[in-house]
Amino acid sequence: MRIGIVTGGGDCPGLNAVIRAFTKATLNNSDWEVVGIADAFGGLLQDEPYVIPLDRAAVSGILPEGGTILGTSNRADPFKYPVLNVEGEVRYEDRSSLLLSRLKEFAIDAIVMIGGDGTMRIAKRLSDMGVKIVGVPKTIDNDLFATDVTFGYDSACNIAMEAIDRLHTTAYSHHRIMICEVMGRDAGWLALQSGLSGGADVILIPEIPYSIDNIVARLDERRRHKQLFSIIVVAEGAKEIGGDASVVGQGHDAPRYGGISYVLENKLKSRINQEVRSVVLGHLQRGGSPTHFDRVLASRYGEFALQLIEKGLFGHITALQNGEIVPVSLDVATQKIKLIEPETCQTLQTAKKLGICFG
Ligand code: F6P
């Protein structure tokens, strides 16, 4: 058998660890071959298609490397593939049948698809068309419903936590309010975990629309207690009660969030007599080396993906549930995304009891 491995959607730390683990496990335990498909499915869908042979040398030394050696894209969707017309305008084509014929041409019998919710929805459609697919869930947003944790999330939380630590010393020295904007799309996991671990005073998440009055009250209270600085962590998808998320553009299949920290900064400036500054962490959260947790999780996912193929369990993803890696069908995995449920989320309740304001 010849197995193609592909990374789709945004990059995150740990992608290379999955590629390496899957390739090593396959070469060590079977007589199958592994090839990489470049730039999501771009490498197979372009005019001169190609695949990247993956042998032991190709995956050697990539465990600690961020990004993906295969390249990725959140636009190389075979069902909505962007092509430029002669006027230079983008139009979209369904290239799914082309993909099927290219898979045949390159003798690829099965695919391991590493990606987030968008990639898993593509995997589901391909699987419904008869492609033998196994999914591996990644995203710094941790919003995939079927798994307790996606890899990449722990690394991003650590990066954000370290940034918040650094903001503390400058906030403290200047008696300022520092706002730190983190990613996460519609989910507040990254903001909650990095804010709690970084000692934030206010955490704003998309799941709880905030009131400026409540934030101002919390900042005033801190000043009354002679705590002359404060740290606010805001998720990019957060919004004021009755307001909208701050959108900076349109992505392939969803709006691109960003800039809520500046919106908040301006509103707070008119309400409090204290300097306010904002930092948007942006793609820094997706860069660099994976943490120990993500390296282990990515390696376990990569090896388990091989087990799924060996058992013929196509149309499934690898998922972490209560410490064990288990298969979950793509049907179930793509039903919905996982958001914070404020009433039942233990971590959020703990944060509240520590005095963190959620707006
Ligand atoms: O899904 C991962 C993520 O980093 C989100 O947190 C963020 O909203 C989005 O991707 C940014 O996408 P892009 O890299 O296309 O700007």
Image (cartoon, grey):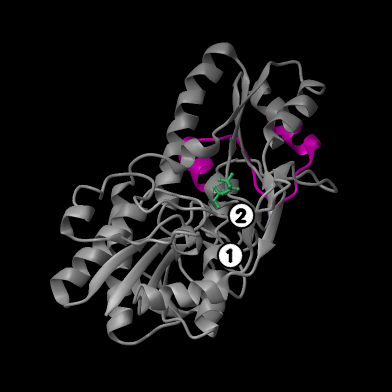
Q: Is residue 205 magenta?
A: yes
Q: Which mark is residue 85?
A: none
Please state, as top left, top right, bottom left or bottom right, where the C terminus lies in the image: top right
Q: Residue at x 35, y 80 (%)?
A: 109
Tell me: 217 left or right of 120.
right
Looking at the rendered structure, the secondary structure element under dot 2 is: loop
Tell me which amino acid carries mark 1: Lys
User: Horizontal and vertical percent for residue 15?
Assistant: 37, 54
Q: Is residue 176 magenta?
A: no
Q: Name the image quarter holding residue 322.
A: bottom left
**Is the C-beta separation of discs 1 and 2 under 8 Å?**
yes
Q: Residue at x 32, y 53 (%)?
A: 16
Q: Name the image quarter holding residue 55.
A: bottom left
Tell me: 235 left or right of 290.
right
User: Horizontal and vertical percent for residue 214?
Assistant: 76, 38
Tell me: 200 left or right of 270.
left
Tell me which amino acid carries mark 2: Ala
Please state, as top left, top right, bottom left or bottom right, where the N terminus lies in the image: bottom left
Q: Residue at x 15, y 75 (%)?
A: 29
Q: Earlier in the sequence, mark 1 or mark 2?
A: 2
Establish if 196 lies above or below 24.
above
In magenta, the rendered stretch is: 193-218
Q: Which mark is residue 338?
A: 1
Q: Residue at x 67, y 58 (%)?
A: 253
Task: Identify the residue position indicated by label 2 in the image.
Answer: 187
User: Horizontal and vertical percent for residue 220?
Assistant: 72, 26
Q: Nearer the viewer, residue 258 or 202?
A: 258
Q: Residues within 10 Å of mark 1 (few under 14, many from 20)?
A: some
